[in-house]
Image: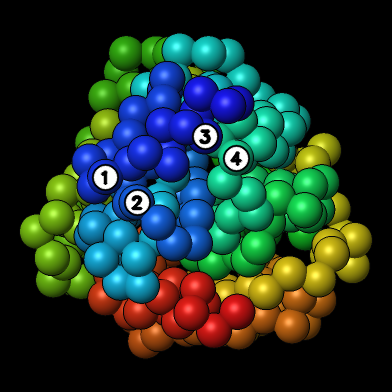
Amino acid sequence: MRAARDRLNSFTGVPVQIEDVTVHGSSGPPVLLLPGGAESCNGFFPGLVEGLVTDPGCRVIVQDRPGTGTSTTPGTLADASAYLNALVNRLDLGPVVVVGQSLGGAVALLLARDYPASVAGLVLIDPTPINDPKSCAQIERMTRTLASAATLPVLRTLVAAALRSTIARSTRKQDLRPDCAAVFERTAHLDLPKLNRAVHGLAEAAFDESTLPPVPTTLITADRKPTTAIAKAHARLATALNAKVEAWPHADHNAHLTHPEQTLTAIRTHITTT
């Protein structure tokens, strides 16, 4: 821990690589990025690292927790909050503002619940509704089914084609920025078995939002009907955390890609006003 702290304290502007973690920025509030699914954090949030380092001046932590991205270390959802708490302590950078999208948002909530002293704030980008056990069970079943299908060559080809078609339509419809479109397109190459492993245990991990400690929160939601189960779960989260809610027209589950400028502004505002 002392060696990690010394390297961070001597940082002069070049990203610091500490084992499997990269810290961008020389000073300012620490921000931990948690991507969705089992995706790698590197490049997942286009423009966010550079934007936050420049303004308001942050130290942005980029890493892949075990079982996700490029990490070769096995890991489960059940282990996620303990791993991240240990990471924050190892870097001596806590408490951190956690920015999490989708499953990353659910993990951020688990970290805040289990280790509140490590979390200074939350920015949740259409988080997986971990406060809705029924939705969590449905998500877990769906990913398990897709992962099983991916073991059969014919079905794997069909699933991949369907993903590419869906992503191509979304990209054309949203008129995405080139760097955001590139991230969208990489999701067409989902490692479904890895995603299934990352989601495993989601239903068991689900919890009531009333168990969350008070923590400054910004909740960015997709533009969906308020009667859906996810919208209702997000509304309960917002009430429990007294969260600031952002819901932009035509934003989808990947609001950091469909609305990157608004997302960056929302995170900056959260950091500078809490």
Residue 266 is situated, as x and y percent measured from the top left of the image, at 43, 78
Q: Position of residue 66 (x, y in %)?
A: 55, 23
The residue where tag 4 is placed is 92
195 over 256 or under it: above or below: above
Pointer 4: residues within 10 angstroms few (<14), some, or many (20+)? some
Q: Nearer the viewer, mark 4 or mark 1?
A: 1
Q: Are marks 1 and 2 in contact (CB under 8 Å)?
A: yes
Q: Quadrant of the C terminus?
A: bottom right
Query: Of marks 3 and 1, which one's residue comes earlier in the chain?
Result: 3
Q: CA–CA distance between discs 3 and 4?
A: 6 Å
Question: Looking at this rendering, what residue extends furthest in the left direction?
Answer: 178
According to the picture, the residue beneath numbered tag 2 turns out to be: 26
Q: Distance from label 2 to label 3 (Cα)?
A: 12 Å
Picture coordinates of residue 75 (x, y %)?
62, 20
Tell me the SS state at disc 3: helix
Q: Looking at the image, is 52 positioned above or below residue 190? A: below
